[in-house]
Amino acid sequence: MAQHGLSEEEITTLATRSIQAKASAYCPYSKFPVGATLLTNDGQYISGANVENAAYPVGICAERTVLARAVADGHRNFKALAVATNITPPGSCT
């Protein structure tokens, strides 16, 4: 086992999928793409990205997007959450 009870493979998969998820971010105002990936206790990976709207800075951060998606799909037990950004995130997402 690696750090925090995660295997090296789980850590690598979380990081890779979070980085890939940034590509689906909708961030025309901040130009700040964020991707996140959640690992469920049963081994499923769920990814999401931040979504902004015209009432900037109101929007939904990647972490909230992926958690909402997972819960809507019936998941309730999680093992890890990874976030990928280009810089340290601002505001309520830190």
Image (cartoon, grey):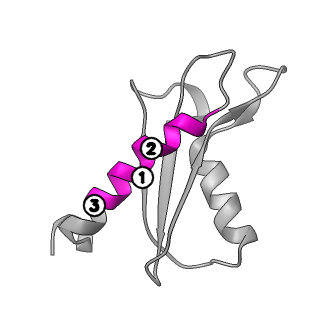
- In the image, residue 70 lies at what x, y percent? 64, 67
Instruction: Determine the secondary structure under disc 2.
Output: helix
Residue 58's mark?
none
- In the image, residue 29 lies at what x, y percent? 69, 15
Instruction: Determine the secondary structure under disc 3.
Output: helix
Mark closest to the chain's N terminus, 2 or 3: 3
Q: Is residue 24 magenta?
A: yes
Q: Residue at x 61, y 55 (%)?
A: 66
Near mark 2 (Cα within 10 A), the count class, few <14, some 14-19 or many ≥20, is: some
Between the residue at mark 2 and the residue at mark 3, the CA separation in whole angstroms equals 14 Å
Judge left or right: residue 19 versus residue 51. left
Residue type, numbered disc 1 = Arg
- In the image, residue 71 lies at what x, y percent? 69, 70
**Which residue is tagged 2?**
20
Q: Is residue 37 above or below residue 54?
A: below
In this view, the mark in front (2 or 3)? 2
Between the residue at mark 1 and the residue at mark 3, the CA separation in whole angstroms equals 10 Å
Front position in the image: 83 or 17: 17
Near mark 3 (Cα within 10 A), the count class, few <14, some 14-19 or many ≥20, is: some
**Which residue is tagged 1?**
17
The answer to the question of whether label 1 and label 3 lie on touching residues, with beta carbons closer than 8 A, is no
In the rendered structure, which segment of residues is drawn in magenta? 12-25
In this view, the mark in front (1 or 3)? 1
**Which residue is tagged 3?**
11
Residue with the most extreme left position: 1
Q: Residue at x 54, y 29 (%)?
A: 33
The answer to the question of whether label 1 and label 2 lie on touching residues, with beta carbons closer than 8 A, is yes
Q: Is residue 80 above or below residue 20?
A: below
